[in-house]
Image: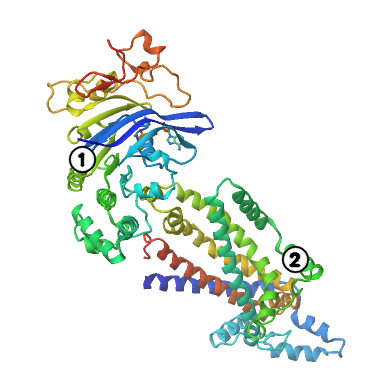
Amino acid sequence: MSVLLDVKNLTTQFNTEAGIVKAVNDVSFQLNEQEIIGLVGESGCGKSVSQLSVMQLISAPGKITNGEVNFEGRNLLDYESNSDEMRAIRGGKIAMIFQEPMTSLNPTLTIGRQLTEMLELHLNMTKEAARERAVELLKQVGISGAESRLDDYPHNFSGGMRQRVMIAIGLSCNPRILIADEPTTALDVTTQAQLLELMKDMVSKYNASLVIVTHNLGVVARYAHRIYIMYAGNIVESGTTEEIFANPQHPYTKGLLKCIPRLDEEKGRKLVPIEGLPPNLINMKSSCAFAPRCSERLERCLTEAAPPLRDIGNGHYVGCFEK
Amino acid sequence: MAAYIIRRLISGFIILALVTLFVFFVMRLLPGDPLIIFMGRSVSSGNMSMEQLENMRAEYGLDKPIMVQYLNWIKGIFHGDLGTSIHYHEKVGRLMLERFPITLHLDIFSLFIGTFLGVMLGIAAAIRRGTWVDTLATGFANIGITIPVFWLGVVLMYTLGLKLRLLPIAGYTSPFDDFWMSTRQAIMPVICLSITSMAVIARQMRSSMLEVIKQDYVRTAWSKGLKERVIIFRHVLKNSLIPIVTLLGLAIGIVVGGSVLVETVFAIPGVGRLLVDSIFAQDYVVIQSSILIIATIIIVVNLLVDISYGWLDPRIRYS
Ligand SMILES: Nc1ncnc2c1ncn2[C@@H]1O[C@H](COP(=O)(O)OP(=O)(O)OP(=O)(O)O)[C@@H](O)[C@H]1O
Ligand SMILES: [Mg+2]
């Protein structure tokens, strides 16, 4: 498998009045051809910001201060965020689906227009060709009566349907990568499962790779080949899905696993939430950000910086002291 | 939709009925007598006897009980007769026909310019937020809101007209008679008439665009790789215009109200000026009818504005 997207030492900060928010801190991750990865962490840990940085969709006061985003032999961060090259990547090569299905579509444009504008832009299609393709795409994501629904507005669609439309939009220009930022968080469980299944089928149909961003390890368990665990702007552990579930190393990962229900578990296990709250990312200390909540904390954790990711074999990496 | 329009028309009708009642009776409550004022003016040319006065009173139907006068007026309206001016000795309908096109010309022009420039200024301020463009546009809008139109008119007249001699000082020419002259004469009045609504619209446009730019669907538009221009005009503009439409109704009120001042300052023989002259002359009939016509226009335009909402915002259903 060859590497499609190679993100190295990505650092994104927000210069706010209260101080510098280190939303993404020296984050590296890789995505292979036709692979599905999961990016998991609690709310506010920098998942969205890291993905928006890849697309260069960070606006002031945010700034990407360091790192590389290598894609098809180029470092995307060399491009200006509004350059023609970067715009060709956005939507054309890397597409993104967002958290909020209810507000992510423009209420004053028809679904058809929101699909065709992209086809006309990236694939230079004529209006008629784009319309035909749009119908086909809507059919593929399971919207019945696609032809007639093209002229409907988003408010005529339910949340799940809108997210299907978003998937259609995302994949419309055959991108290499689809980034789904908590695509199902706002939806009910049945719809969630259907959408994840649909996304998996669609990316394999289009030979694309998929990044699933979520705060729920359970969501990615079935679909992701590999998982990155993120905490307070850092990747703290990564590995294949089997490794992460069978052999979690970082206390944070263990904590996350303890709070999801599992089918294969012994009866009577209690679901325990991780105690405490994630730290405020403003003006953070250099010591391990998870230490204050950590159940396996050592003396040094409170004073020393967390160690860099350490290879423990089987493609499994962890950023915690060896015990 | 049809049902909605019919309902709106009915309620508009009720409002107009209330307007007629209000202007009619409030005018009569004011002290003074139009005939005596009229007589006072003609005193120099000769003396009018008490008898003549009473004859005139009968001629204009002013000797009848007030309720009857009201009903006669209303009856006249339904027959297309707005009454006869005491001051001008002319049918109000004819007076209006002469003067109305003038006010319409300037007001429509001002409304169009005020809205267009207001929207443009708001867009510029919003997309260049925090830069000198924003500072300039916002400052200009704040001045526009607070500046007294009357004062602005006089200052413009003095500077552009009298001192620099760039524009004709006052007056009005129909564009069909002399287009160039007409346009030059219209410039200062149109500036005065449009500046307030332009400022109000610019401020609203700025804040509504800044609000829309933050929306999730705009982020989606960016993620599609669209050009900034396309994002602004296709995705942001229409959504930001929705609150502006509400302001249009208000802007019409501002412009029509401003006509009274501006036509007086620039000696323009429009309805606004007619209204002012008639108030000084206590010419009941003209005042009543002018106000009724102005009210009708405002009601109709507001209906059109509400209907245009549906075009901007597909979520709106008229029921
Ligand atoms: N525009 C901004 N200005 C200041 N801080 C910001 C801004 N956008 C994001 N942040 C900060 O960056 C951090 C990471 O935010 P991000 O949206 O990436 O979190 P997330 O992991 O996606 O969380 P969630 O699960 O809630 O979506 C947060 O602490 C947030 O406060
Ligand atoms: Mg997020």
Q: Quadrant of ligand 1?
A: top left
- The amino acid beneath tag 2 is Leu
Mark 1: few/some/many CA within 10 Å (<14, 14-19, 20+): many
Mark 2: few/some/many CA within 10 Å (<14, 14-19, 20+): some
Vertical arrangement, residue A228 with respect to residue A248, above or below: below
Q: Where does residue A302 sit, x and y in percent of width and height?
A: 40, 12
Examine the image and state in which quarter residue A246 appears: top left
Vertical arrangement, residue B30 with respect to residue B124, above or below: below
Check the image and name the residue furthest to the front: A73
Q: Nearer the viewer, residue B154 or A252?
A: A252
Would the CB of label 1 be found within 8 Å of ligand 2? no
What residue did someone put label 2 on?
B156
On the picture, is B112 further left or further right than A159? right
On the picture, is B273 further left or further right than B305? right
Q: Where does residue B173 sit, x and y in percent of width and height?
A: 69, 81
Q: Where does residue B212 sit, x and y in percent of width and height?
A: 45, 51
On the picture, is B304 further left or further right than B163? left
The dot on residue A34 is 1
Mark 2 chain: B
Examine the image and state in which quarter residue B10 appears: bottom left
Q: Nearer the viewer, mark 2 or mark 1?
A: 1
Q: Nearer the viewer, residue A251 or B83?
A: A251
Q: CA distance from mark 2 to mark 1?
A: 70 Å
Whether residue A21 can be seen here: yes
Q: Residue at x 36, y 59 (%)?
A: A109
- The amino acid beneath tag 1 is Gln
Mark 1 chain: A
